[in-house]
């Protein structure tokens, strides 16, 4: 049984009020024969219920039994006594909805404009000072990539990753035993294309690009990578769709959504595709030149890029759900280890950001920031030769 603590003074006042109202009703109506007994009882009962509602809501709850939960009943009573409570509660819910919509818009806008104006180490300009990166000119790795060392989370994070301030990650996700043991090999026995390359931002150019000539933009660089992979026996498709031009103007606000709408039909028509690469060009300060020497050739440096669908402010972003985050992380880490082993200095640290970037299209999805606007087309093509070798090593090699 529910027990309610009722103030004695309130109870006494309530009983007195009931007595006076009942008595008054009796004397007022009792002598008049024109008032029927049923009518007098009805009026009396309504008056008594009024007093009970005002002075003894707790007793009514006990005797009549709750038709709702205690919390719901109490909230209803509060709103009856103080109508402004209902208004504030409704307004709060409405404002929360609007705030969520605004948050979604901001997150999608941030994703659309992401991956640009980063310094040489992959840090956003203006947030962290640029760090000089001394690039080795030989084939000797400078990092300890033994599994024992990689199990040290601080070492792994500090040497192989840059985590954007908007997001976060822990050792349960960056588990090298898990990530390095996931099978990234493709099925070479079946016929059909295995890799799809596309460009969410097709208008990205280089220091010596010919304006308006796609062959000298990131699209032309992607075409060269496609040719190299096909020459290695990995059948590759190159999608040259334009997703960042709307009504003749550069507009990246819906580029990722536009790209997904075109890429999905390609994947459905080619079920043998196992790898999806979104190839970008980074944007850096004009004094930054992302270049290294590999085999005596000036080669643009590249950066693997992961989206975690998680921000510090909002936590996991449900509407940017990606079931393949761990596979994406495995793919980029295996590519990073292979790159550092085969071509030390070729790759910048893996960049982890809070959004999704169409990496949910396939377990082996990869976003690559290749070079920057300060690189030449020749340096970019040299980088594609190294990237093709690295992809072959991870996807097919022993």
Image (cartoon, helix red, strand yellow):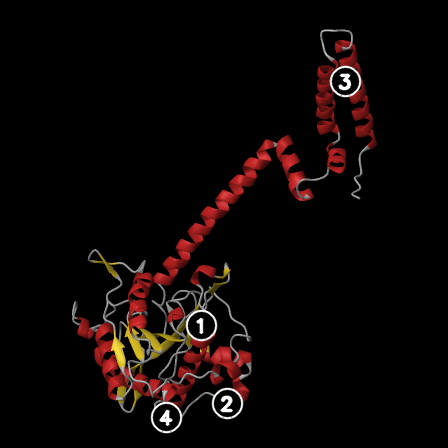
x, y percent for residue 326: 47, 75
Residue at x-position 36% and y-position 69%: 118
Q: Label 2's element?
A: loop
Along the polypeptide, which appears first: circle 4 or circle 3?
3
Along the polypeptide, which appears first: circle 1 or circle 3?
3
Q: Provide the residue designation for mark 3.
A: 21
Measure the C-alpha gap from mark 2 to mark 3.
89 Å
Tags 1 and 4 touching, CB below 8 Å: no
Q: Label 4's element?
A: loop
Tags 4 and 3 touching, CB below 8 Å: no
Q: Quadrant of the C terminus?
A: bottom left
> How crowded is the residue under tag 3: few (<14 C-alpha within 10 Å), some, or many (20+)?
some
Residue at x-position 55% and y-position 88%: 148
Tags 1 and 3 touching, CB below 8 Å: no
Measure the C-alpha gap from mark 4 to mark 3.
100 Å
Along the polypeptide, which appears first: circle 4 or circle 2?
4
Along the polypeptide, which appears first: circle 2 or circle 1?
2
Vertical position of residue 284 compared to residue 227: above or below: above
Vertical position of residue 335 compared to residue 68: above or below: below
> How crowded is the residue under tag 4: few (<14 C-alpha within 10 Å), some, or many (20+)?
some
Measure the C-alpha gap from mark 2 to mark 1.
26 Å
Q: Which mark is residue 40?
A: none
Which one is closest to the eye, mark 1 or mark 4? 1
Snapshot quadrant of residue 212: bottom left
Q: Provide the residue designation for mark 2.
A: 146
Q: Label 3's element?
A: helix
Residue at x-position 23% and y-position 83%: 227
> How crowded is the residue under tag 2: few (<14 C-alpha within 10 Å), some, or many (20+)?
few
Q: Which mark is residue 324?
A: 1
Q: Which mark is residue 139?
A: 4
> Observer-nearest residue: 312 or 98?
98
User: Left or right: 362 with respect to 371?
Assistant: right
């Amino acid at each position: 049984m529910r027990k309610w603590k009722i103030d004695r003074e309130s109870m006494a006042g309530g009983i007195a009020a009931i007595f006076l109202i009942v008595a008054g009703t009796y004397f007022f109506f009792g002598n008049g024969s024109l008032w029927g007994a049923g009518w007098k009882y009805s009026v009396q009962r309504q008056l008594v219920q009024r007093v009970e509602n005002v002075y003894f809501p707790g007793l009514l709850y006990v005797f009549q039994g709750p038709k709702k939960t205690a919390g719901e009943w109490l909230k209803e009573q509060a709103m009856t006594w103080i109508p402004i409570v209902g208004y504030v509660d409704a307004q709060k819910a409405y404002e929360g909805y609007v705030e969520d919509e605004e948050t979604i818009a901001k997150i999608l806008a941030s994703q659309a404009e992401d991956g640009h104006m980063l310094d040489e180490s992959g840090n956003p300009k203006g947030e962290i000072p640029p760090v000089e990166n001394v690039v080795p000119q030989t084939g000797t790795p400078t990092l300890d990539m033994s599994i024992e060392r990689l199990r040290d989370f601080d070492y792994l994070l500090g040497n192989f990753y840059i985590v954007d301030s908007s997001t976060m990650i822990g050792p349960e996700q960056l588990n090298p035993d898990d990530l390095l043991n996931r099978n990234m090999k493709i099925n070479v026995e079946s016929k059909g294309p295995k890799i799809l390359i596309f460009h969410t931002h097709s208008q990205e150019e280089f220091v010596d690009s010919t304006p308006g000539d796609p062959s000298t933009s990131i699209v032309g660089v992607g075409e060269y990578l496609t040719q190299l992979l096909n020459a290695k026996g990995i059948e590759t498709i190159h999608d040259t769709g334009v997703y960042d031009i709307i009504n003749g103007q550069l507009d990246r606000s819906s580029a990722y959504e536009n790209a997904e709408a075109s890429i999905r039909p390609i994947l459905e028509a080619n079920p043998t595709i196992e790898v999806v690469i979104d190839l970008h060009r980074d944007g850096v300060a004009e004094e930054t030149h992302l270049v290294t020497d590999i085999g005596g050739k000036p080669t643009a440096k590249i950066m693997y890029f992961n989206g975690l669908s998680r921000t510090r402010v909002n936590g996991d972003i449900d509407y940017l759900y990606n079931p393949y985050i761990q596979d994406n992380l495995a793919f980029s880490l295996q590519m990073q280890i292979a790159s550092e082993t085969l071509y030390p200095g070729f790759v910048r640290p893996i960049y982890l950001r809070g959004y999704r970037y169409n990496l949910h299209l396939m377990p082996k999805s990869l976003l690559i920031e290749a070079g920057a606007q300060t690189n030449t087309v020749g340096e970019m093509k040299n980088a594609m030769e190294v990237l093709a070798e690295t992809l072959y090593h991870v996807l097919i090699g022993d």
